[in-house]
Amino acid sequence: MKILVTPTSFNAETRNTARDKLDRFADEVIFNPFGRPLEAAEIVPLLDNVDGYIAGLDHINRQVIEDAPACLKVISRYGAGYDRVDIEAAARRGIAVAATPGSNAEAVADLTMGLMLAVARQIPLLDREVKSGGWPRRTGFEIFQKNLGIVGLGEIGKKVAARAQGFSMKIRVYDPVADRRFIERNGLIEASLDELWRESDVITLHTPLVDDTREIINGATIQQMKPGVILINTARYELFNETALLNGLADGRVMGLGLDVYADEPPTDHPLLKYPNVVLTPHAGSHTLEARTRMADMAVNNLIDVLSGRTCSGMVTQTAG
């Protein structure tokens, strides 16, 4: 049994748990030689004679699936999202796809609140100025008792709501399959998107990237928002229309942005880099020891379950074969 593992953090930080279990199961384990998420053309040569693939943020498109060897039986995502995997192509080839939902929810919720505070109080800018010898007096923005809009009430959205309640925020949520028991039990307000755009002082995105959510933040929706809104995105960059986002920042309608996801990583020479009111983190939402340990354990268990013919709790799609 040969296994490919591409998440760059997997080997170093999970040696005593998931890696040991994988070593006991597999005859050979090979790792990502590039130290970053893989492009499609880089993946296929690494799949030679591979039975199972633990995937990071690699671009596993239709061509990768079609060119994969017949022995490949499972792609196990190290993370909750799977929009970079061509699910339909995998099903046609009889390749199972699994993920680790909920494994990074606490970590991403923490970072979301951190970005919210960092943008509202301009913490990174103040830090840089003090370290440069300055003693600035900049006026910030309190999030206490402000209106928070949460788009997507999955595991992460729920945990952000719980944290925001500690700041006495008035929380509106939008999710087409909303957990109404959770909403009622926690005193949240279920809102339409139009109402959420209109009423929120801070908007945070926690929705999957699908056709209906791609560029959900665009020129028209930004015009519906309060002038001076703060936007937070720890989900997927493609939820933004980039031109509209940049225009909103330039004209001040978007007062600040906290961002952990990008179209290209790292975002070299990107226009967002010039804005002092934009706080950027390097796709670090799941970068806690606890989250990475959970993700690794779940990803390895999913892979072993599929290759052993057992029921896999993290299955995204059943195989076609």
Image (tube, grey):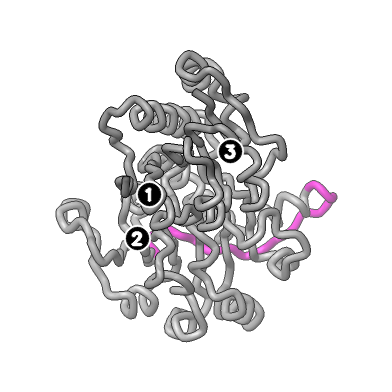
Instruction: Kindly identify the residue that appears in the image at 39 percent across and 26 percent down.
Output: 304
Q: CA distance from mark 3 to mark 2?
A: 35 Å
Q: Is residue 139 magenta?
A: yes
Tell me: 106 left or right of 126: left
Residue, disc 1 = 156
Q: Position of residue 49 (x, y in %)?
A: 56, 32
Mark linked to residue 152: 2
Q: CA distance from mark 1 to mark 2?
A: 8 Å
Q: Earlier in the sequence, mark 3 or mark 1?
A: 3
Q: Is residue 97 visible?
A: no
Q: Position of residue 109 (x, y in %)?
A: 43, 47
Tell me: 186 left or right of 281: left
Instruction: Kindly identify the residue that appears in the image at 61 percent across and 60 percent down.
Output: 262
What span is in magenta?
131-146
Label 1 sits on what residue type?
Answer: Ile
Residue, disc 3 = 47
Label 3 sits on what residue type?
Answer: Leu
Q: Earlier in the sequence, mark 3 or mark 2?
A: 3
Instruction: Kindly identify the residue that appears in the image at 37 percent across and 79 percent down.
Output: 198
Q: In what element is the residue under mark 1?
A: helix
Q: Position of residue 153 (x, y in %)?
A: 31, 57
Q: Is residue 186 visible?
A: yes
Camera-side residue: 216 or 308?
308
Q: Is residue 291 magenta?
A: no
Q: In what element is the residue under mark 3?
A: loop
